[in-house]
Amino acid sequence: MPPRRQANHLVGVDLGGTKIQVIQVADDEIVASARRDTPPGGGPEAVVSAVAEVVGELGDTKGVTAVGVGAPGAIDVGTGVVKRAPNLAGFDHPVPLGPLLSEALGLPVVVDNDVNVAALAEHRLGAGVGSDDLLAVFVGTGVGGGLVLGGQVRRGPGGVAGEIGHVIVRDGGRRCGCGGRGHLEAYAGRAGMERTARKRHDEGTKTKLVKLAGHGRMKSSVFAKALEEADHLAQELVDEAAQALGAALASAVALVDLDRVVLGGGLGDRLGAPFIEAVERETRERLFVPDAPFAVVPAALGDLAGARGAALLAREQ
Amino acid sequence: MPPRRQANHLVGVDLGGTKIQVIQVADDEIVASARRDTPPGGGPEAVVSAVAEVVGELGDTKGVTAVGVGAPGAIDVGTGVVKRAPNLAGFDHPVPLGPLLSEALGLPVVVDNDVNVAALAEHRLGAGVGSDDLLAVFVGTGVGGGLVLGGQVRRGPGGVAGEIGHVIVRDGGRRCGCGGRGHLEAYAGRAGMERTARKRHDEGTKTKLVKLAGHGRMKSSVFAKALEEADHLAQELVDEAAQALGAALASAVALVDLDRVVLGGGLGDRLGAPFIEAVERETRERLFVPDAPFAVVPAALGDLAGARGAALLAREQ
């Protein structure tokens, strides 16, 4: 008979486009963790092997009762099928990731979207504690979102709820990476901001952003550095990002009535408190009920939000 | 002992700014109805008396077990308090309408927002049957909305969910009646369209709209008539309304994942099928997942949606 504490052990897997982060938790405490690169080729088979390997590195997993996985893309939570995950090699068609992993690990496996599990973690353990109606927004290369309504993650009939990045803030406006126009992500995602910065630079606007980026992509740290150096274009783009977030969040509050927004992701974390405050101010100015209880708060769980949420998912399913 | 059928009788009250419509239902069939004008003065007391009177006109209400009320404004469903209802005289402060009516009628009374109960009726008995995730949009003087998620009306922590009319479609754009900028209602509400039409007319744009309106307000029928007569400005404003609805609805689908929109209200009904089709087309062009199951359908219950939904509310609480 295993020790009593072990009956509660769960594994959370954050399967990203570049990294696989795995943790083992007992009573919401992390007792082991492991991490490796996501295989860049080899398709679903290689990914399943890699996840099984890194779970094996956790050590003593005898007491583990279930595994939760957060994966990028469109997921059918009921069946564990990843319908499409453009950021994973070989996942451009439906892959029964849950069943494959369950067979490889000999454990029940439940799969959900990576942003949904991160939102779940922030709601249960992080910056969302105390609110049952919140949106977690992760501002990085793109803008992802996870919606918690009445204390439950909202997935919707197609499993695609929470896509705040593709809410329209200016109909017919700036082109988004998805092809749409005027989406939040076109104004507040790092990639959209980089496209605009390079275009403006090519058109003759003076900026340090292009030089700071060098030959690589214009990282979140580049925007942060340029702001420190009082670069006008960087300030303009970050202001636009906060305004677009304000518009999209005010729309979200009008439609579903939320009392909190948890803001994280690479760009959100880098730009820190002044950005969080700007987003709250821009949202509040646009609220239909201006005196409604509402706050924008920084995400609390950082890079581990996905793995922690995946472990919660394993417990709750 | 009353006859068995009567155990199921319920009363639904649609308390509007101008009319009070009351029905009595048994097994979802209307068995009696009555209607009168809303008292223009006299405050909450006069409104409670008027509702009690018109309920009395239903005839035999011995078998009635509960009363549901749909009222304009912000409602606390749990307590039956109307927090604020600008369209009802004397309701500019919180009024315990549920308890007051319960005392007057000697029956349990439950109160919700008029648009929420209309959405409930369309979901359970009308154009929403078959969908558990829908938005009912009523396009009239303003643009109201009721959100049904997972088969339940979404109210939210502040009780103000569903306000699609105040979703932003163009940040910084046209001024809304509420003071905000770029809201859907500024482009697709009859009052906003009238403001734009009169402004454009004053600026020299040729249009029949102002002449057709005469000395009164520019009713939905005026827009319909001007369209029939191929008035360019009327067509432009109706096209803009459909585009703004498309943007707001695409945002709603991205955020909460809906498979149906029920479109009604005075302007929606008047403009009919071509307008419904235009709104569906404009929404579909903007969907983040373009091939998702999604349809815009006309509301089915007309003016009785509010009273029918109020009766459903009485049954379900």
Image (cartoon, coloured by chain):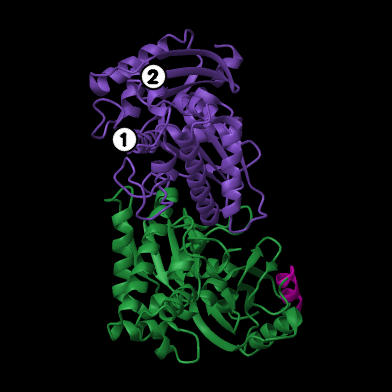
Chain colours: A purple, B green
Residue B69 visible somewhere in the drawing: yes
Position of B254 with respect to A92 (left or right) is right
The vertical placement of A269 against A167, above or below, is above
Estimate the x, y position of residue B181 in percent, counting from the top left.
52, 60
**Which secondary structure, mark 2?**
strand
Estimate the x, y position of residue A190 in percent, counting from the top left.
41, 33
Chain on which label 1 sits: A
Estimate the x, y position of residue A81 in percent, counting from the top left.
32, 34
The vertical placement of A234 against A257, above or below, is above
Estimate the x, y position of residue B108 in percent, counting from the top left.
69, 71
- The residue carrying pointer 1 sits among few (fewer than 14), some (14 to 19) or many (20 or more) residues within 10 Å by Cα, namely few
The residue tagged 2 is: A19
Which residue is drawn at the image coordinates 65% and 73% (left, top)? B86
For the residues labelled 1 and 2, the Cα–Cα distance comes to 34 Å
Question: Which mark lies nearer to you, 1 or 2?
Answer: 1
The residue tagged 1 is: A202
Which residue is drawn at the image coordinates 76% and 81% (left, top)? B45
Of the residues shown, which amino acid type is indicated by label 1?
Asp
Disc 1 or 2, which lies upstream in sequence? 2
* Range shown magenta: B93-104
Chain on which label 2 sits: A
